[in-house]
Amino acid sequence: MMKGALLLGMIGITRGYNNGLGATPPMGWNSWCTDGLCNLIGDDICNEKLVKSIADAFVEEGLADLGYEYVNLDDCWSATTRDADGNLQPDPKKFPNGMKVVADYVHSKNLKFGLYTCVGTKTCKGGRPGSYNNWTRDADTLTSWGVDFVKMDHCGANGAIPDVELYGNMSAALNKTGRPVLFSLCNWGEQKVYEWGVDVAQMYRIQMDHLPFWHLNGGGAGEGFGSGTLDIIEYMASLVPSRWVRQYGWLDPDFLMTLYPITMPFVESRSEFTFWALWSAPLIVSTDIRSLSAEKKEILMNKEVIAINQDPLITAGDRVSGKQGGPQVWVRSLANGDKAVVLFNSGSADVAIGVTWASLNCTSSTYAVRNLWNQTDLGHYTGEFNASSIAARDVLLLRISAV
């Protein structure tokens, strides 16, 4: 068996997986929770009509102008068997014209197209063929259709082989095709993926599925059925994200559940987006982006918040004070010397939250403070800033600039 270290030597240890895509955190959409129930009940729904309507919406709603570019299908698109030659093939009822026609349509909008596969012999839902021991065949098939993004899930992984080797096989196969492909490694955070994922993929999942709930008592890497937003925030705090984020190597807390009906209302969705932006996480929305509501536009299309996510310093925000159930302060440095600061109420009642500049390792005594969600300047503050009341589950996202 090839050892993980030898495999990494073959594909190149760069501490950042650069094959032409993923220089900044990828932004886009995934089908997982758009027309279905996140695969919890029934199937993830997708078809040619859906893909085209989503690509149209990227342009018509103005999302493409802000950097959203990936139109990705999850575990929904393929037939349950390979073709006579052993190749992956699309479900003929959902995609009667084949996947290249779909990819070409997405590309005609100056967008990119992504598909899903699995590291085992079967995918997670629907019994579709996985890519185990078909690395080269599947990489060649996917790229021949014009795929720009490949997510590889973890169901059925061969436990006798380290994940770094399993995913490394697909990584190497994709690179051999010569086509730039963003490789999304989804091993649910197992086997300390944060230590090696950056060498194998441009983005790598760091825990179980993000489900559209605030709190599920979910665990961390490989634990439980799935995590709510608060669970992910707490697990990310334990990881100290700035230790691991690299260009072409983004920590992936999973899809955004922005305004999922009933279970992810506005405040929770805004807090979710705030943290994903702070962490330089991929901004891949899994809810419907067609005919955006005013509230959804307010969250997904705030240029100043997106700028934090895409900031060229290439780092992530860490928690500097607080714990679950109470007030928290998070901070991230920015390329121009500013800092992004999150005052987060993780509790169940309104609370005042304050922060001193010294606690953020600031070098000046006075800072101009801007509220990024409201896009308003709050004034100049010396030594500290205090918010008199932040609602439960809510955030105050600030950008501070030395005066």
Image (cartoon, rainbow, N blue to C red):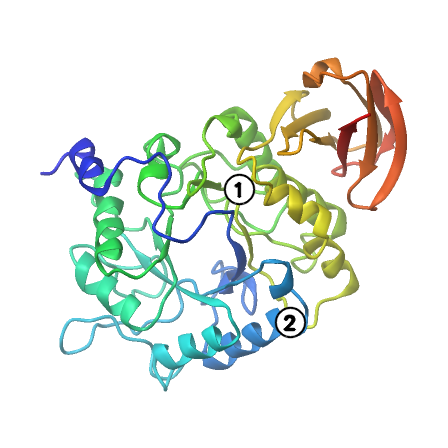
| Res. 380 mark | none
Q: Is residue 151 left or right of residue 57?
A: left
Label 1 sits on a secondary structure element that is loop
- On the question of residue 275 being in view, the answer is yes
Q: Would you place residue 336 above or below residue 361 in this image?
A: below
Please tell me whether mark 1 or mark 2 is closer to you in this view.
2
Picture coordinates of residue 394 (x, y %)?
76, 39
Look at mark 1 in the image and give the residue it sits on.
227
**Type of amino acid under label 1:** Ser
**How many numbered discs sit on the rendered protein?**
2
Picture coordinates of residue 214 (x, y %)?
64, 43
| Res. 290 mark | 2
- Depth check: 212 or 338 in front? 338
Report the residue that reaches farthest toward the left.
1
Label 2 sits on a secondary structure element that is loop
Picture coordinates of residue 189 (x, y %)?
40, 37
Q: Earlier in the sequence, mark 1 or mark 2?
A: 1
**Type of amino acid under label 2:** Arg
Q: CA distance from mark 1 to mark 2?
A: 26 Å
For the point 82% across and 37% down, which residue is it?
370
Quarter of the image with the C terminus in it:
top right
